[in-house]
Amino acid sequence: MNDVDRLKQIVDDRIESESDALFALGDEILHEPELGFKEHATSERVQRWFKHLGLPFRSGLAVTGAKATLDTGRPGPTVCLMGELDAIVVPGHPHANPDSHAAHACGHNAQIAGLLAAAVALTDDRILSGLSGRIVFFAVPAEEFVELSYRRQLIDAGAIEFIGGKPELIRLGEFDDVDLAMMIHTSAPKHGEKPVELWESLNGLIAKTATFLGKAAHVGNPWDGVNALKASTLAMDAIDAQRETFREDDGVRIHHIIARGGDLVNVVPSEVVIEMNVRGKTAAAIREAGSLVDRCIHSGALAFGARAVVDTLPGYLPLRNDPGLADILIPNVERIFGKECVGYRGHSGSCTDTGDVSHLMPTIQPSMAGASGSGHGVDWAIADRSAAYLSPGKTMAMTAIDLLRGDADRAETILESWEAPMTKAEYLEFQRGIRSQKTFEG
Ligand SMILES: [Zn+2]
Ligand SMILES: [Zn+2]
C-alpha cells in the first residue's frame, strides 16, 4: 500500500467508525426539513459538528450558511467542499413538515451528512500533516429556487440580494478565499443506470413573475370585465406554440405555475399571477427565450385589453463540470462503487446554483446513488444510508487529499490551466443586469 492509499484507508476507517453518528445526523435532518433561508435548526446541527471536530467556523452567512476552515498551516490553494441545507416543498411526502410541506425529497440531508463525514476524515492529524493549503467545509442555504414571494420580501428587507444561496454567498465574498469547489448530489438511479453520474453541463435559469391585470365584473355580465385568466392562458398557449422553434442544443425549458388564478368563481378574474422559470444551456439561449416569453405575455394582454407586468429576476448560471477535477475524483468513486461505476452524460435540463460557482472557479458536482423514487416526488427516500450519507464524504475527502497532497501539485496544475468564464465583478454585473420590470398595456 503506498502513501496515498494509506491515507485513503484512513478516510474509509474514520468515516466508518463514525457511521452511527453520521446516519443519525442524516436522519435527523430528514425529519426536520426546512426551506431555503430558514434552515436555522439544520445549520445549528452543522455548527455543533464543527465545534465537536474543533473546526473554527462562521455562521449566519446568507442568513443560515455555516463555513468552517481547516488550515494545514502550509501555503497552497483552498478546496471548498459543499453541502446544501434546504428542503423542497412536497405536500404528501411521508417526511414532509405538516405546516410548510417542506420535505427532503432532493437528498440535501445526505449532502450535509456527507459534508460532515468528509470533515470527520480530514481533521485526522495523520491526513492533515501530509497536505498543503486549506479545506473549507461549507453548509450552504437555499439551493432550491422556490418561495419567490417570500424571498422577494427578504430582498425588499435588505436581508439578501439574490434568490439563491450560492449567488448570495458569492456577493458577500464568501467564495473569495476559495480556489476549487466540489459537491455531490444524491441520486436515485433507475434500472440500468450507473451509481455515479457525471454530466458535462446543466442548464441555467431566470425567473419571471407575470401579473395580468384585467377588470372584475359579474360573470353574468362578462362584457363589463377584462378576463385576466384568459389573457394569461393565451400567453402560455403562445409559448407552447413556439416550443418547436427551440434548438435542441440550447436545452430551453419554460415552465409555469398559476400562483394566483382569480378570486371567486362568479367574478371575472381581474388579477392573475403566473410564476415561470426560463431555463437554457447558455446565457444567450436563456436571454433569447426570455424575450420570447415577454412577447407572448404582451400578446395575451394585447388580445384582451389587459395589462401585464413582468418582473424578471436573475436565477442560476449553467453548470460546467471541470474535466481536470473529474480526472481526480473518478478513481475515488471507482474505489467505492467499483470500476465502470460512472455514467458520463451530456447536458441536463436541471439547474443548480453550483453553476454560478463554476463560472468563477474549477467546480465539480457529480450525483451519487443512495436514494430511490423520483427527485422532488412523494416517493423519494434514502434507500442506502451508507451510499447516501458516507460515500459522498469519502469521495470528497479522498479527492481533497489528491488535490492537496505534498505541495498541492494537482490542485495547482488544474488552476494553472483554468480560465474563469467570469470574474466576480462580471458575474455580479451580469446577474444584476437581468433584473427588470416591464409593463405591457393591452
Ligand atoms: Zn432539488
Ligand atoms: Zn437538490
Image: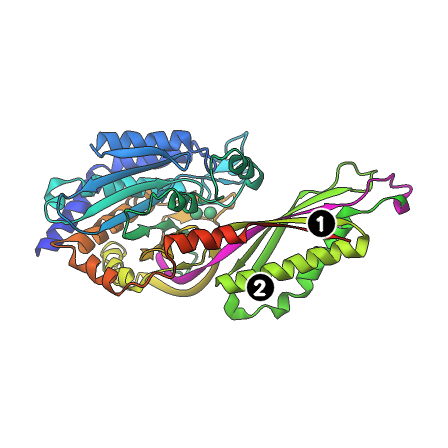
Please say whether residue 196 is one of the residues in the magenta stretch: yes
Distance (Cα) linking label 1 and label 2: 20 Å
Residue 247 on image: x %, y %: 56, 70
The one of 314 and 95 positioned closer to us in this rendering: 314
| Picture layout, residue 78 above or below residue 410 | above
Left or right of residue 401: residue 33: right
Q: Quadrant of residue 242?
A: bottom right
Disc 1 residue: CB within 8 Å of ligand 1: no
Residue 1 in view of the camera: no
Residue depicted at 45% across the width and 56% down the height: 317
Left or right of residue 380: residue 133: left
Amino acid identity at mark 1: Ala
For disc 2, the neighbor class at 10 Å (few under 14, some 14 to 19, many from 20) is some
Left or right of residue 150: residue 104: left
Which colouring convention does the figure follow?
A: rainbow
Residue depicted at 30% across the width and 34% down the height: 58
Left or right of residue 375: residue 149: right
Q: Which residues are magenta?
A: 194-223
The one of 335 and 293 positioned closer to us in this rendering: 293
* Label drawn at residue 308: 1
For disc 1, the neighbor class at 10 Å (few under 14, some 14 to 19, many from 20) is many
Q: Give the overall secondary structure of the magenta segment.
A: strand
Q: Quadrant of residue 325?
A: bottom left
Query: Marks 1 and 2: CB-CB under 8 Å?
Result: no
The quarter of the picture where the N terminus appears is bottom left
Q: Secondary structure at mark 1?
A: strand
Which residue is identified by label 2? 288
Please say whether residue 139 is one of the residues in the magenta stretch: no
